[in-house]
Image (tube, rainbow, N blue to C red):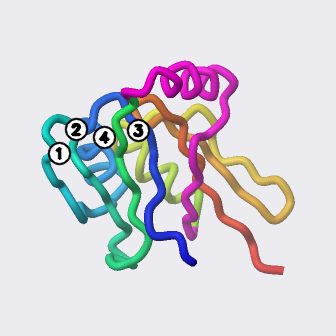
Amino acid sequence: MKINWTSIFVTDQQRALDFYTDKLGFILKHDIDMGGPRWLTVVTPEEPDGVEIVLEPNSHPAVVPFTEALVADGIPMNQFAVDDVQAEYERLSSLGVTFTQEPTTMGPITTAVLDDTVGNLIQLVHQSEG
C-alpha cells in the first residue's frame, strides 16, 4: 500500500490550479472533465510520477464548515516540505502570496503558513537534520 493521491478541498478548481502552478510551482498532471467538476491533479516537478494533489471541489455540505473552521483557528489543511522556509517566504511574498504566519523556528522545525486563495491555509515546513 502506498500514498498515490491526497486531496485538498478548494472553492474554485481553476483558481486553485492557477495558484498551485503559477505561485507554488507545482505542475499539472491530470485535468479530466468529469461532467462538471474535473479530476484535477498537480505534482511537484522534482517527482512528476510521485504523489498527486487532487484539487477537489468543496461541494460536499460538510466540507465548507470544516475548512472554514480550520482557517478561523489558523490551522493548516496541509503541509509542504521546503529546503528553506525563509527563501520560499520571500519568493512567494514577491508573487503576492499572503502569509498568516511568517517564518518561525521552533527547535529543529521552521514553518510559515500561507493562504492558498481557495479556502485553505498551507504550512511550509523545513526540518533540520540532527
* SS under mark 3: loop
- Figure check: 16 above or below 66: below
Residue 107 location in percent, x, y? 86, 60
Question: Label 1 vs label 3: CA separation?
Answer: 30 Å
Which of the 4 image quadrants contains residue 119? top left
Residues marked 3 and 4 touching at CB (< 8 Å): no
Residues marked 1 and 2 touching at CB (< 8 Å): yes
Question: Label 3 vs label 4: CA separation?
Answer: 13 Å
Question: Label 4 vs label 2: CA separation?
Answer: 13 Å
- Figure check: 98 above or below 17: above
Q: Amino acid at mark 1?
A: Met
Please give the range of residues in magenta.
59-83
Question: Label 1 vs label 4: CA separation?
Answer: 17 Å
Residue name at image x 35 percent, y 28 percent: 11
The disc label shown at residue 37, or none: 2
Which mark sits nearer the N-terminus, 1 or 3?
Answer: 1
Question: Label 2 vs label 3: CA separation?
Answer: 26 Å
Observer-side mark, 2 or 3, equals 2
Which residue is labeled 4 in the image?
16
Residue 105 location in percent, x, y? 77, 53
Residue 32 location in percent, x, y? 16, 54
Which mark sits nearer the N-terminus, 3 or 4?
Answer: 4
* SS under mark 4: helix
Q: How many marks?
A: 4
Q: Amino acid at mark 4?
A: Ala
Which mark sits nearer the N-terminus, 4 or 2?
Answer: 4
- Figure check: 37 above or below 123: above
The disc label shown at residue 97, or none: 3
Residue name at image x 40 percent, y 57 percent: 53
The disc label shown at residue 34, or none: 1
Q: Amino acid at mark 2?
A: Pro
* SS under mark 2: loop
